[in-house]
């Protein structure tokens, strides 16, 4: 089937991301597989092509708006995506920036199987999916404070999300939380928890998704000291 890539290409241009034809094909294959598998399992409420492009793919890639995210210095960087669901933002980041090493964590085994099938279908390497709860894996030495970047589009309050996510981040690394609309009050309310966990809210980046009125924000938290064991 032929797909109109106008919106996608315009959005990529706005984000300053250049993709090869093969990478664009990977996104289309991912879209088709997502919609196909969504018929038999609950992966996403968003299935219409342009909506997936906008609200899943371009939204996931919008992390390039964070000042510390340097597209030229990603080789060997490790990323963990907490509560990844159907693979957002982790899989779009892996397709666009194949040099990243990515781990996707989800609490539902069926979704983890879908993710693994997707990696194989798209020919992705240096990416893995793990099944479990964020708070359990955070105690595991193989995962604790091992990542340069933690990302999450999970729908939780910032204080709670920070408790799940910051333990995975190396000192000097970042946790970026994808949010909707204005998060000023939520960020202020989370400051104490973030500090206890060894983090500091560095920035909040506000933007609209391309060609839309949909307001999004990225809360950027820097890990400045080790997370206490408790």
Image: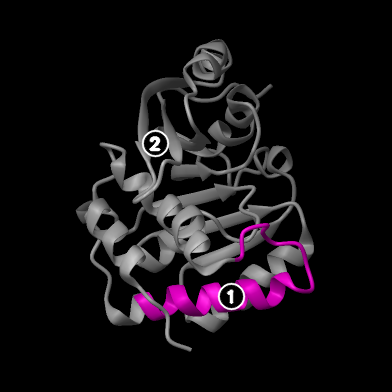
State whether residue 228 appears in this view: yes
* Mark 2 or mark 1: whose residue is earlier in sequence: 1
Which residue: 76% across, 62% down?
42
Q: Quadrant of residue 174?
A: top left
- Tell me the tag on residue 118: 1
The single residue placed furthest to the bottom in the displayed view is: 1
Q: Where residue 73 sits in the image (x, y, percent)?
A: 23, 52
Residue under label 2, please give it: 173
Q: Main secondary structure of the magenta part?
A: helix
Specify few, some or many for label 1: CA neighbours under 10 Å numbering under 14, 14-19, or 20 or more: many
Q: Nearer the viewer, residue 159 or 227?
A: 159
Q: Nearer the viewer, residue 127 or 9?
A: 9
Q: Where residue 79 sits in the image (x, y, percent)?
A: 46, 51
Distance CA(mark 2)–CA(mark 1): 28 Å
Q: How many marks?
A: 2
State whether residue 124 appears in this view: no
Rendered position, 207 above or below 43: above
Q: Where residue 5 sits in the image (x, y, percent)?
A: 35, 73
Q: Element type at marker 2?
A: strand
Of labels 2 and 1, the one closer to you: 1
Q: Which residues are magenta?
A: 24-47
Q: Going by the image, does 102 lie left or right of 16?
A: right
Q: Where residue 105 sits in the image (x, y, percent)?
A: 64, 53
Q: Quadrant of residue 173?
A: top left
- Tell me the tag on residue 81: none
Q: Element type at marker 1?
A: helix
Q: Is 185 a magenta residue?
A: no
Rendered position, 39 above or below 229: below
């Amino acid at each position: 089937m032929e797909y109109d890539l106008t919106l996608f290409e315009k959005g990529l241009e706005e984000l300053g991301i250049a993709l090869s034809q093969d990478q664009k094909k990977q996104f289309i294959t991912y879209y088709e597989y997502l919609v196909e598998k969504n018929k038999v399992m609950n992966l996403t409420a968003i299935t219409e092509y342009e909506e997936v492009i906008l609200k899943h793919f371009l939204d996931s890639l919008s992390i390039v708006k964070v000042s510390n995210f340097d597209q030229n210095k990603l080789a060997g960087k490790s990323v963990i995506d907490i509560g990844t669901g159907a693979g957002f933002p982790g899989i779009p980041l892996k397709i666009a920036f194949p040099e990243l090493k990515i781990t996707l964590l989800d609490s539902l085994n069926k979704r983890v199987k879908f993710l693994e099938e997707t990696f194989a279908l798209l020919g992705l390497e240096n990416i893995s999916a793990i099944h479990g709860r964020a708070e359990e894996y955070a105690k595991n030495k193989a995962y604790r404070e091992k990542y340069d970047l933690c990302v999450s589009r999970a729908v939780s309050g910032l204080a709670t999300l920070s408790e799940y996510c910051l333990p995975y981040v190396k000192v000097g690394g970042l946790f970026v939380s994808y949010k909707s609309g204005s998060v000023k009050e939520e960020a202020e309310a989370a400051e104490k928890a973030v500090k206890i966990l060894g983090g500091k809210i560095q920035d909040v980046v506000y933007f609209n998704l391309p060609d839309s009125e949909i307001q999004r924000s990225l809360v950027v938290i820097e890990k400045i000291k080790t997370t206490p064991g408790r």
